[in-house]
Amino acid sequence: MDSTVAAIPVFFGTMGAEHLWLRAHAEQRGPTPADYEWRDTVASLTMGVGSLVAPFVLPKLLAPFTPGKGKYGKALVVTAAAAVAATSVADVVARRTTARRVARRIASAGGVVAVVTGGIAITSTLASRTTGNRMWNRRLVRDLGRGPVALAAATLGWDFIYYWNHRFMHESRYMWAIHVVHHSSERYNLSTALRQPVADALGTFVPYSLLALVGLHPDLIADARGINLLYQYWIHTDTIRRLGPFEKVLNTPSHHRVHHGSNQQYIDRNHGSILICWDRLFGTFEAEAEPVVYGLTKNLDTFNPARVAGHEHFEMLRDVARSETWRERLSFVVRGPGWAYRRHASGARES
């Protein structure tokens, strides 16, 4: 059984204990973002359930459209190519003729179709070419076994790859559209840890299966994943302040509170999972100083899980539809979310 599923009773037990502790100290602490709010907690738990179901559902839905494997893979690629061509022609027509309005509508729809179909083609192909078993069969060194040393190596390797994947999810908008779910709560307690993405199948991640190439069995990599996720659970709390010398090496509640902050100096910092040394090494570390303001730079004001999960994808595609060049369309997709938000702000000032 998946260790994260087996740990569900522990999740509920510790959330209950944290809630009781917060209530017991409410008078001396006053209201804080750590307090449980019923609608927020339900939304987090709902998205947690969705994150467990999605890995079984989305790959099956996308499988028929996987280029080179699925029944409709070739049709998907042809559709993407046709949409790119139609949009490119419409862009030229819109700039050079009086039929601007019609051409702009064609370019608007074509740009969205091209981005969606092209994106699915790329992500599904990457997933199909980097499965654990496929990498294992192509491993470069002998099987390292299932002992504690091999498990430690798998856990360390997963942690390193996770840092980069997590960092990419903050630095590219189409990846942020997947991850923004986890940052959408203005609360910060153990239930926030369960507010997980449901659309990982739409992302391009550094494959954890690369660890199989160096002799780490796929089952061992799956164990490393469980260790990684279980570790991340307990650091989503405000009740643990500092851990002394461990703060130098490990990702702690203090470091992860920074990661969830919308304060300017906290944005896109502390991407590590178990170890914080990756952030220190690659220049993304920030210590907790001023009080953390949780949530997004522009909060959603909703507890609807569907809206929370899909709002950034919707807004990204709306930006693509309104763009007039491929440079602008692709920038709204692959550049950082901050670029898009600044672009919106400058456009608003100009109008």
Image (tube, grey):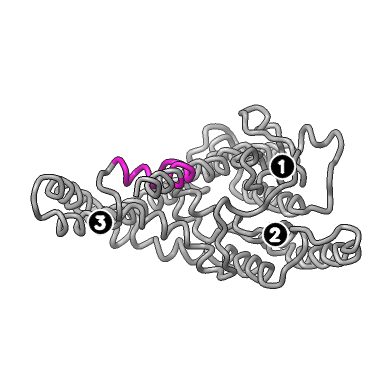
What residue did someone put label 1 on? 274
Q: Residue at x 21, y 54 (%)?
A: 107
Q: Earlier in the sequence, mark 2 or mark 1?
A: 2
Q: Which mark is residue 187?
A: 2
> How much space separates mark 3 and mark 1, taking CA atoms?
43 Å
Per the image, label 2 sits on a secondary structure element best described as: loop
Residue nearest the viewer, comparing 168 with 205: 168
Residue 27 appears anywhere in the view = yes
Per the image, label 1 sits on a secondary structure element best described as: loop
- Horizontally, residue 336 falls left or right of residue 273, namely left
> How much space separates mark 2 and mark 1, taking CA atoms?
22 Å
Cβ–Cβ below 8 Å for labels 2 and 3?
A: no
- Horizontally, residue 133 falls left or right of residue 28, namely left
Q: Earlier in the sequence, mark 3 or mark 1?
A: 3
User: What amino acid type should be assigned to the residue bearing mark 2?
Assistant: Arg
Q: Quadrant of residue 248?
A: top right
> How much space separates mark 2 and mark 3, taking CA atoms?
37 Å
Magenta-highlighted residues? 327-341
User: What amino acid type should be assigned to the residue bearing mark 3?
Assistant: Ser
- Horizontally, residue 80 falls left or right of residue 12, namely left
- Residue 285 picture location, percent across and down: 67, 33
Q: Nearer the observer, disc 2 or disc 1?
A: 2
Q: Residue at x 71, y 72 (%)?
A: 38
- Residue 26 picture location, percent across and down: 87, 63
Q: Residue at x 54, y 44 (%)?
A: 170
